[in-house]
Amino acid sequence: RCWERMKKLEKSRIIRGYHAELDLGRLAKLSTFVVQIKLTDYSYAKAKVFEAGIVAQPNVIACQAVLGGVDYLMTVAAFGIEHYQTIMDRLLETLNVSFDYVTLPVTKKLKGEASLDLAALLATAQDLEA
């Protein structure tokens, strides 16, 4: 019965995969950097080019399109600041999309999706009723 429920959730894409949460710093001495990206002269076409290029980058371990003063929040894993800068320079050269960016080196990861308490999260729906 549980197996059937799991398969149904997988088929409906509610469960999208199974993952291990890795400590990149301990595993491979990798540092992470959160990068705020603002496309120059934003257009839908430029955004699609940027997104397609980012997906192919192994050092870009996460990227989200956001609303507000920037267009994307990206997480980059690198073997130090010089390696990070090489990655960013390569992105600027190869993506064929101009962008400005602000780098935020991560000093400590406090919480991630792996520590999600789904029951507590769903219980916050009562806040909408108030």
Image (cartoon, rainbow, N blue to C red):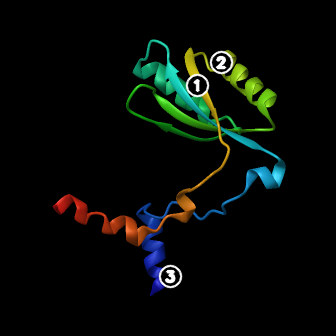
Task: Report whether 85 appears left or right of 47.
Answer: right
Give the residue number, with chain letter if any, for mark 3: 3
Quarter the C terminus occupies: bottom left
Query: Looking at this rendering, what residue extends furthest in the top direction?
Result: 41
Give the residue number, with chain letter if any, for mark 2: 92
Q: Earlier in the sequence, mark 1 or mark 3?
A: 3
User: With respect to residue 86, does 77 lie above or below?
Assistant: below
Q: Earlier in the sequence, mark 2 or mark 1?
A: 2
Which quadrant of the view contains residue 55? top right
Nearest to viewer (mark 2 / mark 1): 1
Give the residue number, with chain letter if any, for mark 1: 102
Query: Looking at this rendering, what residue extends furthest in the front direction?
Result: 107
Nearest to viewer (mark 1 / mark 3): 1
> Residue 14: percent from the left, percent from the top?
43, 63
> Residue 117: percent from the left, percent from the top?
46, 68
- Secondary structure of the residue carrying tag 2 is helix
User: With respect to residue 40, does 76 lie above or below?
Assistant: below
- Secondary structure of the residue carrying tag 1 is strand
Q: Residue at x 62, y 20 (%)?
A: 95
Q: Residue at x 43, y 78 (%)?
A: 5
Q: Looking at the picture, which amino acid does disc 3 mark?
A: Trp
User: With respect to residue 90, does 75 lie above or below?
Assistant: below
Q: Residue at x 65, y 35 (%)?
A: 56
Q: CA distance from mark 1 to mark 3?
A: 45 Å
Q: Residue at x 74, y 42 (%)?
A: 31
Q: CA distance from mark 3 to mark 2?
A: 46 Å
